[in-house]
């Protein structure tokens, strides 16, 4: 399993691995929004929690459909399926690799972009906490979507349509944590629900994703 | 016979019209597709029968 | 005569062939009776004025939108557990019907809301959760279209339906959490205080029956079409192979 | 470490392609599958490898004993030859990367990126993976594509050595590898349509 993780990280970092794609997109969103909405600090402050979360979510989505497609195209997925590693484990490791390559950098960069969007001071800690808790769910739900559409023509577009509705609970609770945190309100409930969804997804979705891959390899 | 709808006549009318249009569209589409597929299946089955017969 | 008898498409086609005309007739009767009764013979409500008449479309459609997804969930489970071809195809057949009912619920809700809330669209929790349900339906239908092999498509869509149901349920409460809501209480709720007056609820029951029968007849019709299409696909595939 | 197939029927895209296939593969034996294109060789191999369920019949084989090599050799272009093999060795929990590279004459290319290899060299890397799996039963689908004559002999030698120390090989190929192997021609096992007494699928009978 560790070997697969190392291989995937190496593949992502090497040329053409798309390491910086998610980050660049996130930066783009954070730059475009003020240009579109206007520099008015008050409005920016109000919408910054939501925009940061939507930006992080879309950046995750952007880099997810390649997670199985590359291995499917060069035949590695068939070989992984016949290897001693259980497919559920392979899915979890791939989701983890995607999180390390895309999710984690988003979490670290988000506060900097928070400055661009004039996020209120109290919000930064909660932004970090909610993204750290939420992005693993985005990765594993996205891995499920990628598993469903591996091998399909135009799978990437379809995957976004399938995965977006599944992202909504995480998005709503995540943005809510930051919004309440920024206003100094109690964040207990949304944080707990966010963590609950992530825990549930991490525990159950790899099984659904592995089943979907087995069906697609048939 | 027409009930007195008052100032909301437009609203109620629009809601009923929209809903009925959506339902009729769905029914029409379903019935049309049922016919197309039924005919196509009959043609394929006849062709099969001729080949094997 | 357990439902496993109906795994065989031949028997399902025979039985549904007999049932379809009756169910369609019953649906028409109930719908027309219910809507006429509700539209013409009910007085204006105090707060809503004549817009209360929209209840006879909005509530049944909204109920059916959710019931349709539940039916698809059960059908998907039956497919995954017993490889029951007809149930997978009935789920595929029910999806567009469910989507249409969701859209009707949304459109009537938005139109009805306009005079009350002063805007065409309010991000009210129930309307928003129906918007999300519509997204789930779209994804489900799109996945069926995207996969060529029918068995693979049935498997993938079943997994999506099961996982989607959990997240649809989560979204329902996430949206409630996210916005306090302008929507009125449950029209047909158990506690009497909230329950809408009898003069309104009787036609409502008839309309609901009408919508349920309409749903059943449409799903039967579309499932028969899906089975025929599937048989044609099998014949052509075999012909290509011979 | 025996592979026994009894009365196997397999389908491709829901349509039965082969039925009534039976054979046994004891240690030290090789079996070559012959048959025209599209008869179902690949489908049969994928079923034996466990990638897809069989329509009927039984596959009796010890768990974790089959190594599968498909048309596509699953080589990562941005990884070097050694990294590719090291990954598969770790995945199968066995060593022997150097030995595998030596056997398939890849030692000189150890540090070259797989993307810069020729088709033949890439194919040899894909086959070297089999050596690294440490699995007794090799299931191979057209292994000698894009291999030149010398490489084919090299690969035949590797298979012969594998058979010598108790391995088994099931190969779908048109090229004579010069192995003393049984031959199973699949044309006799083509699936008959329902009208001619074949399997009747759920959607095969008319509704009348």
Image (tube, grey):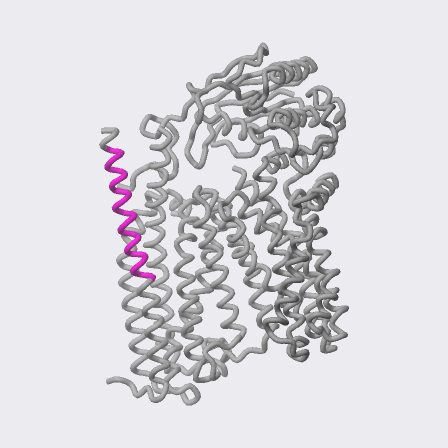
Percent position of residue A185, x then y:
72, 77
Quarter of the image for residue C114 reads bottom left
Q: Which residue is drawn at 45% across and 63% down?
A: C67
Residue B29 shows in this picture: yes
Where does the N terminus of chain A fall, quadrant-wise? top right
Percent coordinates x, y for residue D63 in the rendering: 64, 29
Which residue is pictured at 33% across the width and 86% down the height?
Answer: B5
Q: Residue B11: horizontal and vertical position, in percent?
A: 37, 81
The image shows residue A140, relative to residue D76, as above or below, that is below
Q: Quadrant of residue A16?
A: top right
> Is residue D37 inside the magenta stretch?
no
Instruction: Tell me if residue D19 can be seen.
Output: no
Residue A31 in the image, given as x and y percentages of width and height? 65, 66
Front-most of B38 and A184? Answer: A184
Q: Where is C63 relative to D111, above or below?
A: below
- Prevailing secondary structure of the magenta residues: helix
- Along the horizontal axis of the image, is C78 left or right of A102? left
Magenta stretch contains residue B42: yes
Give the residue drawn at x 31%, y 49%. Answer: C15
Count of numbered tags: 0
Q: Nearer the viewer, residue A50 or A195?
A: A50
Q: In this view, does A161 lie to the left or right of C44?
A: right
Q: Residue at x 40, y 44 (%)?
A: C7
**Which segment is the magenta one?**
B26-49
């Amino acid at each position: 399993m560790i070997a697969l993780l190392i291989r995937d990280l190496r593949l992502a970092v090497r040329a053409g691995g798309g390491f910086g794609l998610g980050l660049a997109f996130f930066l783009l969103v954070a730059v475009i929004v003020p240009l579109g909405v206007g520099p008015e600090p008050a409005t920016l402050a109000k919408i910054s929690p939501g925009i940061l979360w939507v930006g992080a979510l879309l950046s995750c989505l952007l880099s997810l459909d390649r997670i199985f497609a590359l291995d499917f195209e060069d035949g590695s997925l068939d070989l992984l399926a016949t290897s001693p590693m259980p497919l559920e484990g392979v899915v979890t490791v791939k989701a983890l690799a995607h999180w390390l390559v895309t999710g984690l950098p988003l979490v670290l960069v988000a506060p900097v972009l928070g400055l661009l969007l004039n996020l209120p001071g109290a919000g930064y800690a909660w932004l970090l906490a909610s993204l750290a808790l939420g992005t693993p769910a985005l990765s594993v739900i996205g891995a499920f979507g990628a598993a469903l559409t591996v091998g399909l023509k135009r799978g990437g577009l379809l995957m976004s349509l399938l995965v977006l509705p599944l992202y909504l609970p995480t998005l709503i609770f995540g943005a809510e944590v930051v919004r309440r945190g920024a206003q100094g309100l109690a964040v207990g409930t949304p944080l707990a629900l966010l963590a609950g969804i992530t825990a549930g997804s991490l525990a159950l979705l790899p099984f659904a994703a592995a089943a979907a891959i087995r069906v697609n390899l048939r | 016979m027409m009930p007195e709808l008052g100032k909301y006549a437009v609203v109620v009318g629009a809601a009923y019209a929209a809903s009925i249009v959506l339902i009729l569209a769905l029914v029409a589409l379903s019935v049309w597709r049922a016919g197309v597929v039924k005919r196509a299946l009959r043609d394929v089955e006849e062709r099969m029968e001729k080949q094997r017969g | 005569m357990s439902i496993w008898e109906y795994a065989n498409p031949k028997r399902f086609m025979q039985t549904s062939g007999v049932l379809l005309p009756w169910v369609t007739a019953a649906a028409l009767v109930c719908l027309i009776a219910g809507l006429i009764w509700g539209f013409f013979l009910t007085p204006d409500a105090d707060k809503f004025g004549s817009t209360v008449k929209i209840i006879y479309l909005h509530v049944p459609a909204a109920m059916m939108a959710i019931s349709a997804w539940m039916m698809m969930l059960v059908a998907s489970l039956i497919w995954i557990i017993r490889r029951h071809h007809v149930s997978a195809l009935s789920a595929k057949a029910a999806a567009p019907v469910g989507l249409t009912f969701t859209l009707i619920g949304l459109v009537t809700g938005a139109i009805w809301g306009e005079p009350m809330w002063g805007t065409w669209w309010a991000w009210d929790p129930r309307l928003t959760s129906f918007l999300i349900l519509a997204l789930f339906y779209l994804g489900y239908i799109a996945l069926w279209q995207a996969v060529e092999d029918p068995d693979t498509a049935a498997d993938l869509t079943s997994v999506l339906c099961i996982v989607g149901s959990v997240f649809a349920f989560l979204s329902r409460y996430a949206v409630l959490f996210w916005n306090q809501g302008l929507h009125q209480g449950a029209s047909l709720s158990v506690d009497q205080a909230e329950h809408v007056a009898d003069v309104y609820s009787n036609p409502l029951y008839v309309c609901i029956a009408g919508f349920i029968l309409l749903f059943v007849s449409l799903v039967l019709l579309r499932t028969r079409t899906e089975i025929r299409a599937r048989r044609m696909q099998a014949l052509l595939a075999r012909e290509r192979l011979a | 470490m025996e592979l026994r197939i009894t009365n196997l029927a397999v389908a491709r895209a829901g349509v039965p392609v082969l039925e009534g296939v039976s054979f046994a593969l004891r240690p030290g034996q090789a079996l070559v599958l012959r048959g025209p294109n599209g008869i179902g060789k690949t489908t049969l191999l994928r079923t034996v490898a466990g990638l897809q369920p069989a329509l009927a019949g039984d596959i009796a084989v010890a768990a974790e004993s089959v190594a599968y090599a498909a048309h596509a050799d699953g080589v990562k272009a941005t990884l070097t030859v050694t990294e590719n093999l090291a990954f598969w060795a770790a995945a199968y929990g066995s060593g022997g990367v150097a030995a595998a590279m030596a056997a398939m004459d890849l030692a000189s290319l150890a540090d070259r990126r797989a993307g810069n290899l020729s088709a033949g060299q890439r194919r040899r890397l894909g086959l070297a993976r089999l050596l690294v799996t440490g699995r007794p039963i090799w299931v191979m689908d057209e292994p000698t594509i894009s291999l030149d004559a010398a490489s084919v002999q090299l690969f035949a030698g590797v298979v012969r050595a594998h058979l010598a120390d108790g391995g088994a090989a099931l190969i779908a190929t048109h090229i004579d590898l010069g192995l003393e192997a049984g031959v199973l021609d699949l044309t006799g096992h083509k699936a008959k349509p329902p009208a001619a007494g074949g399997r009747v699928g759920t959607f095969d009978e008319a509704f009348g």
